[in-house]
């Protein structure tokens, strides 16, 4: 279970707060359809920051997820280790302006009740490989590919 279930994203960022915890993979229900196994945990940490000149939340994730290899269709362990810097905009207009300036920006609109679990699930989904597979030569392939 996590240490905090919700945060006020803008206040959290502006006051450089910190929080951390973990979720059982089984709790992350939006991942169930793409996982081969629901065991293990995902550790998370949040840190408020203004390093980019904007209020932001730094989200770090760490864990091991079991996906299905698309070469051999057998379980494949994916090491999850990510760090995302998520600028917090005060409204949709501000976020749209930021995204116009930087199309690669991944920001959030301020939310006084941002669900930590939803944020963690979103970032996991965005970080997963489009085509999960074992390392080259690690599959038991019989067709010679």
Image: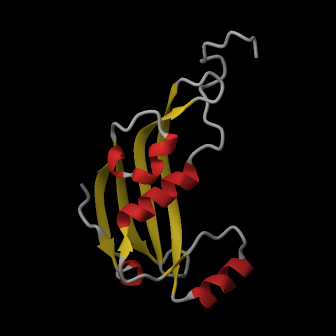
Q: Is residue 19 above or below residue 14?
A: above
Quarter the N terminus occupies: bottom left
Q: Is residue 73 above or below residue 13?
A: above
Quarter the C terminus occupies: top right
Residue 99 position within the rendered picture, expressed as x and y whole percent measured from the top left:
68, 78
Residue 125 position within the rendered picture, expressed as x and y whole percent measured from the top left:
53, 53
Q: Is residue 105 above or below residue 24?
A: below
87 and 2: which is toward the camera: 2
Q: How many marks?
A: 0
Question: By what rule are the colours in the image chosen?
Answer: secondary structure
Q: Is residue 65 above or below residue 122?
A: above
15 and 116: which is toward the camera: 116
Asked which quadrant contains residue 17, the reply is bottom left
Residue 140 position within the rendered picture, expressed as x and y whole percent measured from the top left:
61, 13
Asked which quadrant contains residue 103, the reply is bottom right
Residue 121 position within the rendered picture, expressed as x and y whole percent measured from the top left:
45, 57
Residue projecting furthest to the front: 33
**Residue shown at the point (65%, 44%) measured from the top left:** 130
**Residue shown at the point (61%, 35%) measured from the top left:** 132
Q: Is residue 111 left or right of residue 84?
A: left
**Residue shown at the point (48%, 81%) measured from the top left:** 55
66 and 63: which is toward the camera: 66
Residue projecting furthest to the right: 145
């Amino acid at each position: 279970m996590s240490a905090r279930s919700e945060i006020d994203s803008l206040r959290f960022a502006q006051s450089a707060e910190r929080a951390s915890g973990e979720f059982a993979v089984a709790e992350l229900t939006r991942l169930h359809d793409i996982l081969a196994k629901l065991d293990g945990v995902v550790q998370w940490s949040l840190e408020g920051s203004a390093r980019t000149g904007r209020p932001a939340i730094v989200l770090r994730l760490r864990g091991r997820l079991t996906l299905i290899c698309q070469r051999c269709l057998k379980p494949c362990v994916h090491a999850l280790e990510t760090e995302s810097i998520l600028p917090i905009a005060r409204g949709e207009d501000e976020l749209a302006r930021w995204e116009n300036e930087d199309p690669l920006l991944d920001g959030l609109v301020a939310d006084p009740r941002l669900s930590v679990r939803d944020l963690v699930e979103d970032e996991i989904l965005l970080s997963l490989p489009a085509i999960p597979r074992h390392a080259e030569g690690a599959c038991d392939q019989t067709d010679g590919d």
